[in-house]
Amino acid sequence: MTKKIWTAAELEQMTPSERHAIFQASIVADLDQAPQELLARARATVEKRIAEADRSQSS
């Protein structure tokens, strides 16, 4: 399911409460619904930082 991509012009025409509602609707709280490629990149970044921290602590 592809979500709508709002243009700046469309957002500027909305009320603050309409923009807020769109923002709130875009938040994904369930990792099963999140894009898997995003989760993979985030996991790789975290694992890299942990490894770097482990290396710097053992030096």
Image (cartoon, helix red, strand yellow):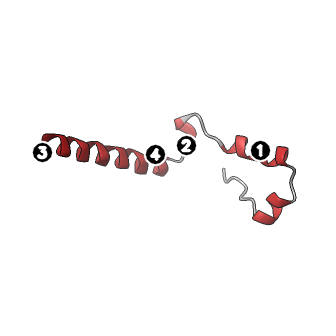
SS label for mark 4? helix
| CB-based contact (under 8 Å), mark 1 and mark 3 | no
Which mark is on residue 34?
2
Answer few, some or many: residues within 10 Å of disc 2's Cα (few below 14, many 20 plus, some between 14 and 19): few
Answer few, some or many: residues within 10 Å of disc 4's Cα (few below 14, many 20 plus, some between 14 and 19): few
| CB-based contact (under 8 Å), mark 2 and mark 4 | yes
Q: Which residue is mark 3?
A: 59
Is label 1 or label 3 in front?
A: 3
Please identify the residue farthest to the top as the structure is shown: 30
**Residue drawn at 42 percent across, 47 percent down:** 42
SS label for mark 2? loop
Which quadrant of the structure image shows residue 9?
A: bottom right
**Residue 22 point in image, percent of width and height:** 76, 46
Mark before the other along the chain sequence, 2 or 3: 2
| CB-based contact (under 8 Å), mark 2 and mark 3 | no
**Residue 19 point in image, percent of width and height:** 79, 49
Residue in the foreground of this view, choosing between 25 and 33? 25
Q: Which residue is mark 4?
A: 39
Residue in the foreground of this view, choosing between 28 and 16? 16
Q: Which residue is mark 1?
A: 20
**Residue drawn at 61 percent across, 39 percent down:** 28
Which quadrant of the structure image shows residue 2?
A: bottom right
